[in-house]
Amino acid sequence: MQVYEDTITYKDGHTYEPIKIVKKENNVIISWKQWFIIFILMLVVSLVYSCIGLTVTYFTLHSLIDLKMVNMDRRIDELSESNTSIAEIFKKMVRENSERDANFKRKIEYLEGQITELEESLYLSSEQNNVTRLSQKVGFTSCGGEIASESRIKFTLLRSSHGINVSSSYDEGRFSPNKAGFYLVLSNILSSSQDGYFIRKNGKEIARAWTHYSDSHVTPRYTAPLAAFMQLSLNDVITIEGTSVDFSSCLTIVQL
């Protein structure tokens, strides 16, 4: 049994083909014109949605571009500030280096001054030590040789002395140092005969010399140079010994 519905007309200025529905076993039959209209409607809806999507995309992209531009401007500002900061940092570094160089120069000048003062102090100390050392040295020269006892020769005429009491240290041809140390003993013997002469320490021979002929217009003269280096203690005794001696003979003893 076929059932037909009446034609449906919409009052929107258009007249549509009546949809004919054949009720036959609950199936709806749509004509090709109706399918075309449905397709057109779907196409229109798709276009509308596409336009909406494009619009949204456009505004989204525009917003993103604006955000990028804002970020870029901010980055440019940051870079500008960074460049300014770098310049300031560089100026600060230059200033600090200049101050450091000035401080270093002042320190060098101070050290040079200290070194100069130290050198002057050392020089004065050295000079003072030399003066002190010289003042501590002892020595004397005595001439006028004659036989004191047996073969011991004494020199009675004091010519010069330093730092020594000759009267207490040199007595009757015996020399005993008042300061221990190293000494140089020199004696120039002049004699009228050819003999042997000795420097003795505590009776032990240290040096020996024989007189040799020396020209003389009156009487023959013989000379003998004696020299010895030795270390002396306070109780040591130095003597010059020989058989004869002239008054012109001399003795020199110096602490080194």
Image: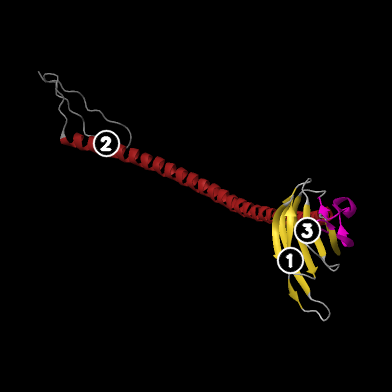
Q: Identify the image quadrant of the C terminus.
A: bottom right
Residue at mark 3 to residue at mark 2: CA–CA distance:
152 Å
* Residue for badge 3: 240
Q: Which residue is mark 2?
A: 42
Report the mark closest to the observer, 3 or 2.
3
Horizontally, residue 27 falls left or right of residue 52, namely left
Q: Nearer the viewer, mark 3 or mark 1?
A: 1
**Residue bearing mark 1:** 195
Magenta span covers which residues? 148-176
Give the side of residue 62 with respect to residue 100, left or right: left
Q: SS class of the residue under badge 3?
A: strand
Q: Residues within 10 Å of mark 1 (few under 14, many from 20)?
A: some
- Residue 197 or residue 125, whichever sits in front: 197
Find residue 57 and report its image quarter: top left
Element class at badge 1: loop
Percent from the top left, x then y, of residue 144?
Answer: 87, 65
* Crowd tier of the residue under label 3, counting other residues whose Cα lies within 10 Å: few below 14, some 14–19, many 20 or above: many
Measure the C-alpha gap from mark 2 to mark 1: 159 Å
Residue at position x 19%, y 35% in the image: 35
Asked if the residues shown at circle 3 and circle 2 are in contact, with their CB atoms under 8 angstroms apart, the answer is: no
